[in-house]
Amino acid sequence: MGAIFDAIHQKLTSAFAPSRLEIEDDSARHHGHAGARPGGESHFNVTIESAAFAGEPKVARQRMVYRALAEELAGPLHALSVKALAPGES
């Protein structure tokens, strides 16, 4: 995987100690669209399950993830889809 994928993985693992973390580079589906970069790593889908999200509403969970990835979102990462779950949720 690439540098942005690795940064997302490292930062989310460090911030949330997830029991499940799935990161999908979805950039190929956005080829030719705004923000798409040659070589990909511009659009990602993330599914993360962590006890840190227990009791938090959906929007708060997404904000937590966005804060952890603020540097990437300010630069090379154009779009991020987040599904943040507490343990036992689907």
Image (cartoon, helix red, strand yellow):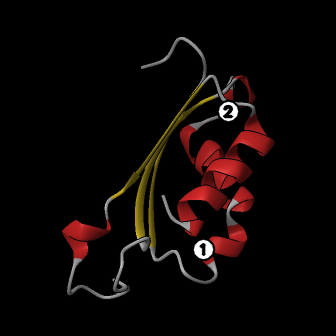
Q: Is residue 80 above or below residue 85?
A: below
Secondary structure state at the residue bearing disc 1:
helix
Left or right: residue 52 compared with residue 66: right
The residue that disc 1 covers is 73
Q: Where's residue 25, x and y in %?
A: 38, 58
Q: Residue at x 70, y 69 (%)?
A: 70
Q: Residue at x 66, y 29 (%)?
A: 18
- The extreme front residue here reads 1
The residue that disc 2 covers is 56
Circle 2 Cα neighbour tier, 10 Å, few/some/many (<14 / 14–19 / ≥20): some
Q: Where's residue 63, x and y in %?
A: 65, 54
Q: Is residue 18 above or below residue 68?
A: above
Tell which of 41 and 18 is nearer to you: 41
Amino acid type at image mark 2: Glu
Identify the mark nearer the N-term, 1 or 2.
2
Quadrant where the C terminus sits is top left
Q: Residue at x 53, y 11 (%)?
A: 88
Circle 1 Cα neighbour tier, 10 Å, few/some/many (<14 / 14–19 / ≥20): some
Q: Where's residue 49, x and y in %?
A: 58, 28
Between marks 1 and 2 in the image, the one whose residue lies nearer the viewer: 1
